[in-house]
Image: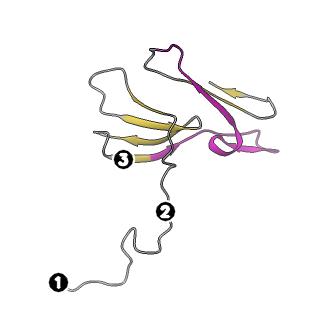
Amino acid sequence: MEPRGDRLAFGHPGTALFGAPSRKDGFGTAYSADSQLWYTMWRGVVTEVYYPTIDRPKLRGIEYVVTDGDTFLHDEAVHMESTIERPHEHALGYRVQSRDPEGRYTID
């Protein structure tokens, strides 16, 4: 079989990287023991989703975009201020809140 040579392979030298930030604020999975879905988060947004095991990334980035349809469009990771807290010292969960810097809305 002859090589085609008319296309570059995915990830070829010189390709810009497009991964999520390596710094993480948290990771988790569903409460159910049957869950095969894992996630990581940073600055209030889901940065990766893994399935069926934590070493198999399937999705990069889930975040909200908020607009009034006219004067602003906010990307959650770029324009919003986020806080991440644990409801209790021993809790296996997070409370994430993202806010508009001008106080127009909050996402809990």
Residue picked out by circle 2: 17
Task: Give the Cα separation between the discs numbered 3 and 1.
Answer: 32 Å
What residue did someone put label 1 on? Answer: 1
Which of pointers 2 and 1 indicates the residue nearer the eye? 2
Left or right of 45 in this view: 5: left
Disc 3 crowd rating (10 Å Cα; few below 14, some 14-19, many 20+) is some
* C-alpha distance separating marks 2 and 3: 15 Å
Which comes sooner in the sequence, label 2 or label 1?
1
The foreground one among 25 and 34 is 25
For the residues bearing labels 3 and 1, Cβ distance under 8 angstroms: no
Badge 1 amino acid: Met
Residue 86 shown in magenta: yes
Of circles 3 and 1, the one toward us is 3
Name the outermost residue toward the left. 1
Q: Which of marks 3 and 1 is nearer the N terminus?
A: 1
Q: Quadrant of the N terminus?
A: bottom left
Q: Mark 3 points at which residue?
A: 57
